[in-house]
Structures are given as structure tokens and as C-alpha cells.
Image: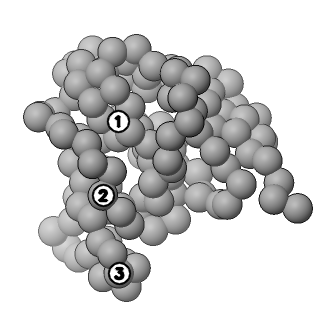
Amino acid sequence: MPRVKLFSHYEVFNDPKALLKRFYEDDFDYRNTLLLEKDPHIVITGEPGVESKADIVSYNPNKIVVSVSTDQPALLFLSDSYYPGWKVTVNNREEDISIADYTLRAVVVPSGKSRVVFSYTSLF
């Protein structure tokens, strides 16, 4: 799996044990479906087009910048662990980070070009 990827399919689980069980089921395709702990309330009408892409612009311990281009709303997946203190902005607007696949991160991105910035500030 790449470090960042756009997803158009997801399943929502309110129970972490049920999410983990689904993750290990034989018919689960982790390459094309994210498992989320809460509904991102996004309407996705199909697969991202061939021109849709996500690229890391810069990667530092406390700040990750991703350039996204997509022909429809999507979920941007970042294969880094979720941890309190991380915030995300999409086009300079603060958004919620979704916990994906039990311990990783995802955020909703709109159609078009976007700049996504994950930044960390210690809670202590």
C-alpha cells in the first residue's frame, strides 16, 4: 500500500471489535475499502478517475503536506497511526480526522485540487 491513497469505498463500525473482525475476514479487500469508526457523511458516486491522485509534498515528524486532485469527493488515506494531537486542514479549513482500519488516518477531500496538511501539536 502506498503511504497516501484515495478511497471511494468504506464501511462504518461503531464497535472496534466488530471492525477488527471484519478486517481479518477473507472477503475483506483492504486495498479498496476503508473501515471507519464513524460515518464521514460523504457522497461518493463511483471510483476515482484515472487522473485522480494524491502525492506527498513534504513529510516531517510534525507536519505532512499532501497534494490531492480528484474528480469527485473521496477519502484520503494516510498510513500513519492516529494519535490525539494531530489536526488536519483541507484547503486551509480544519476537518475531522477519521480513524481508519483501526489505527490509521483518513480525511474527506472534495472534488478538484486540494492541499491537505496534517500537523501535530503536543497535548502536554
Residue 33 makes an appearance in the image: no
Give the amino acid at mark 1: Leu
- In this rendering, which labeled residue sits more in front, label 1 or label 2? 2
- Label 2 Cα crowd, 10 Å radius (few <14 / some 14-19 / many 20+): few
Q: Which residue is mark 1?
A: 6
Q: At 58% across and 51% down in the image, what residue appears?
A: 80
Q: How much space separates mark 3 and mark 2, taking CA atoms?
A: 13 Å
Secondary structure of the residue carrying numbered label 3: loop
Q: At 30% across and 72% down in the image, what residue appears?
A: 13
- Which of 112 and 6 lies nearest the eye of the viewer? 112
Residue at the right extreme of this rendering: 124
How many numbered circles does the render carry? 3
Q: Which residue is mark 2?
A: 39
Answer with left or right where residue 102 lies relative to residue 124: left
Residue 5 in picture, x, y percent from top left = 40, 37
Secondary structure of the residue carrying numbered label 2: loop
Residue 90 vertical placement versus 96 (above, below): above
Residue 98 in picture, x, y percent from top left = 45, 54
Give the amino acid at mark 2: Asp
